[in-house]
């Protein structure tokens, strides 16, 4: 087995700083466009919908359309016009109950503050 020659000169490449900066700016421009597009799409497209319109969620969703015989994945039926987060079937009623409870709690807190300002005892 031969050893590498210790006396051989190491190859060094000189990088043109101006060309390097231009390359970085070009890459930045490409990625900026990609990120902006992804940001816009994420506002209306279900995150579990793949490029072939299959649903990749590991849970049941009311937007899933049963696939044909032999299809492993359900088709995503999300049409992009509603907030898809409420479609998850863990218990859709929980969402509204939570919103109602938060609203009721806020009303109670406002009433308590108003009574305290007037110097009235707690209700």
Image: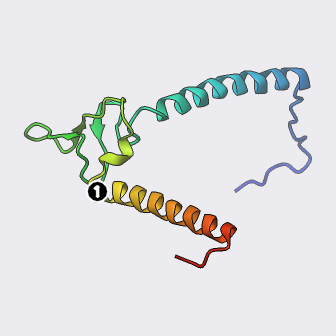
Toward which corner of the image does residue 121 lie, by quadrant? bottom right
- Is 40 displayed left or right of 25 in the figure? left
Is 66 rendered above or below residue 36? below
Which residue is at 62% across, 23% downward?
Answer: 33
The front one of 97 and 88 is: 97
Give the percent coordinates (x, y) of residue 106: 52, 60
Which residue is at 23% across, 45% downward?
Answer: 62
Which residue is at 52% across, 76% downward?
Answer: 123
Residue lying at the far bottom of the rendered structure? 121
The front one of 78 and 15 is: 78
Give the percent coordinates (x, y) of residue 115: 61, 69
Toward which corner of the image does residue 8 lie, by quadrant? top right
Toward which corner of the image does residue 95 lie, by quadrant? bottom left
The front one of 116 and 16 is: 116
Of helix, strand and loop, which one carries label 1? helix
Residue lying at the far left of the rendered structure? 69
The front one of 23 and 36 is: 36
Give the percent coordinates (x, y) of residue 122: 57, 78
The residue indicated by pointer 1 is 93
- Is 1 displayed left or right of 97 in the figure? right
């Amino acid at each position: 087995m031969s050893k590498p020659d210790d006396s051989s000169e190491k190859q060094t490449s000189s990088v043109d700083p101006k060309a390097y900066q231009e390359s970085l700016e070009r890459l930045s421009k490409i990625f900026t466009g990609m990120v902006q597009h992804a940001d816009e799409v994420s506002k209306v497209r279900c995150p579990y919908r793949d490029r072939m319109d299959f649903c990749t969620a590991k849970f049941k969703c009311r937007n899933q359309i049963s696939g044909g015989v032999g299809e492993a994945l359900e088709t995503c039926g999300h049409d992009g016009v509603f907030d898809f987060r409420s479609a998850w079937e863990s218990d859709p009623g929980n969402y509204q109950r939570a919103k109602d409870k938060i609203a009721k709690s806020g009303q109670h807190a406002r009433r308590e503050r108003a009574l305290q300002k007037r110097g009235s005892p707690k209700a």
